[in-house]
Amino acid sequence: MSMLEIRDLTVTYGSGAAVVRGVDLSLEAGRKLGVAGESGCGKSTMALALLRLLPASARMTGRILLDGEDVLAMKWGRLRAVRWAGASIVFQGAMHSLNAVRRVGDQIAEPLLVHGRATPVEARRKVVGLLDQVGLPAARADAYPHELSGGQRQRVMIAMALACEPRLIVADEPTTALDVMIQAQILRLIEGLVADQDIALLMISHDLAVLADTCDRLAVMYAGRIVEEGPARDVYEAAAHPYGRALSSAFPRIGDAASRRAPRGLPGDPPDPAALPAGCAFHPRCPAAVEVCGSEDQMLRDAGEGRRAACVHVGSGA
């Protein structure tokens, strides 16, 4: 059994609009799964749903199995025990996620104290070890968030996520707004932690290249659905779905003068969840759309070894 299994997850809000639609994914311990897509495709909503962190107006159906236990069926006390200890989240934008008026060492220690994993004295000692683990000196524990750089704050968030030794870490855009050197350091840090501690990582980003370089498998999300999934490097270099190809083409390739001078992409934006087009939700923007795409939705189908894609052309020879 996979450590995390998402089965037919659907998230709707009060308006009835489905922001996440029938998502199926699985993740094993020691493995890294990337989820890519444009803003508005449902990535962060899915991540927050994993630990029921969505607002009260959200309605979730399906199953989210964490070590075989359904998160959506957990009582409040059990859910509180699972958060941080069983699974934790590195939120997008560390400056907004950290408490501006508390020292970062106290914030890292908080989950240890809340879950009874340490006494105050032991927590202080563990904070020093966690900071060392993410490459920060012990003295940074006494700093306030505004006294740290963006990369240092992101490392604090990772230390906090690791504090209770969770089995799963969800990283939602963990390198957003960081410069390329710090981004590379953070990514290597995350990869090392996954390998050393045998934890599972679900990493969300709009950057297909980052996910291909970091993750084992890659899922591409559009209009609340997974439209392609497979080995990360294969999906990045030879996507089977036109949307995956468009995401990959939007990034200039080092050494490829043509892509550097004229990176490709797609006009327009993902559709409003409350007004999805008929048929395949991607067909109004799809350069390969045919008549059937406007009337029939496409489900995930076999697209090669270990790969799935939701496109009428997959397996058709087109």
Image (cartoon, grey):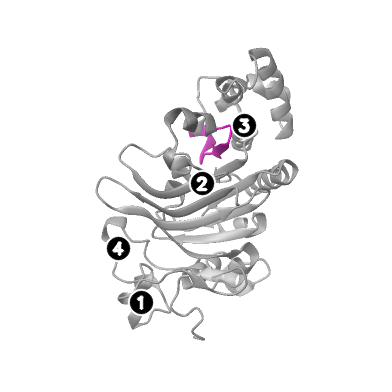
How far, Cα to Cα, is label 4 from label 2? 29 Å
- According to the picture, the residue beneath numbered tag 2 turns out to be 65
The magenta stretch spans residue 95: yes
User: Can residue 263 be seen from the camera position used here?
Assistant: no
* Residue behind mark 4: 276
Residue interval drawn in magenta:
83-96
User: Which residue: 59% across, 54% down?
Assistant: 33
Residue 293's mark?
Answer: 1
Mark closest to the chain's N terminus, 1 or 2 = 2
| Occupied quadrant, residue 56 | top left
Circle 3 sits in a helix, a strand or a loop, which is it?
A: helix
- Residue 93, given in percent of the width and then of the height, sits at 51, 39
Amino acid type, label 2: Leu
Q: Is residue 122 left or right of residue 47?
A: right
In front: 123, or 75? 75
Q: Label 3 to label 1, Cα distance in Å?
A: 46 Å
Three-letter residue code for mark 4: Leu
Q: What amino acid is labelled 1 in the image? A: Cys
Three-letter code for the amino acid on which mark 3 is drawn: Val
Classify 10 Å Cα crowding around label 4: few (below 14), some (14-19), many (20 and above): some
Provide residue 42's location: percent of width, then percent of height: 42, 53
